[in-house]
Amino acid sequence: MPKIQSPVNMKKIVVLSGAGISAESGIKTFRDAHGLWEGHDITEVASPEGFTKNPELVLNFYNLRRRQLLEVQPNLAHQLLADLEQYYPINIITQNVDDLHERAGNKNVLHLHGELLKARSSKNENYVVEWHSDINMNNLCPDGYLMRPHIVWFGEAVPEFDRALDLISQAAIVIVIGTSMQVYPAAGLIQYATKAENIFYIDPKPAYIHHTTISVETIAEKATTGMEKLFKRLISSI
């Protein structure tokens, strides 16, 4: 595919991605039908209260996630979204904590729920560093507090949400891929796509997405095959 130095169509695309896009790379979604994450109640491993009660359990849970992430690669859906930057200006708003969008080549990725390859102070949320190894109980920030995963846990504020609102409000095209659109506040973002001309929803078991002004076109496919079809449509329309 020939490389293009700048987008040839200036319609802004915003992508809302979720666990389904990374599942095809081998990233587990962890939550089962009973709401458990590998046998743990969500509050045990994904809440401030759980971390306070048993920090070692929480650190080990995310250490396993981090090790797995370092063993997998972006899939075709990630790669096609990166290739699409040759044709359109694109922003990715992801609920995923992996770095597969970045590794595929997307330049503008906003992580709503944090990043697994970063750690932060358990006391000072502004002290954030790159972290690609295990976080252990002896890993402390400069102020002497335990380091924790840079993950937005249940019950915590989503610090990037306002920026996400700003991005999606400017989108001419929205692509929703690999997400059930059932987890809030992320699920509410679609209603702020007030300038959208098209909204595409790629998921093998799509939920109903309501938009106030335009209909949502559903592509009932897994992320890779659905994105392959949509990619061809988007570049052929230029």
Image (tube, rainbow, N blue to C red):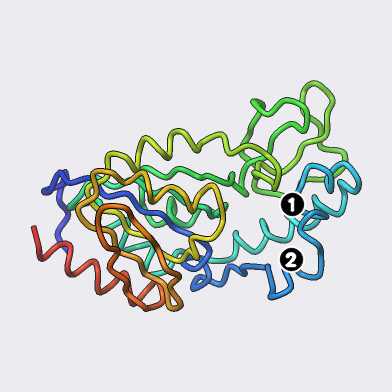
Q: Looking at the image, is 121 positioned above or below residue 10?
A: above
Q: Position of residue 185 (x, y in %)?
A: 54, 47
Q: CA distance from mark 1 to mark 2?
A: 9 Å
Horizontal side, residue 59 vs residue 185: left or right: right
User: What's the residue type where badge 2 is placed?
Assistant: Trp
Labels 1 and 2: the sequence-earlier one: 2
Between residues 19 and 207, which one lies in front from this camera angle?
207
Horizontal side, residue 98 vs residue 76: left or right: right
Which residue is most to the front?
212
Q: Position of residue 44 (x, y in %)?
A: 83, 55
| Location of the C terminus (image quadrant) | bottom left
Q: Residues within 10 Å of mark 2 (few under 14, many from 20)?
A: some
**SS at mark 1 in the image:** loop
**SS at mark 2 in the image:** strand
Between residues 66 and 14, which one lies in front from this camera angle?
14
**What residue is shown with label 2?**
37
Q: Residue at x 73, y 61 (%)?
A: 64
Q: Position of residue 27 (x, y in %)?
A: 58, 67
Q: Looking at the image, is 139 positioned above or below residue 223?
A: above
Q: Residue at x 66, y 41 (%)?
A: 150
Which residue is most to the right?
53
Which of the labelled discs sits on residue 35, or is there none? none
Q: Residue at x 40, y 63 (%)?
A: 209
Kindly check if marks 1 and 2 are in contact, taking CB atoms under 8 A apart as contact. yes
* Count of residue discs: 2
Q: Residues within 10 Å of mark 1 (few under 14, many from 20)?
A: many
Between residues 201 and 102, which one lies in front from this camera angle?
201
Which of the labelled discs sits on residue 46, or is there none? 1
Q: Position of residue 193 (x, y in %)?
A: 32, 46
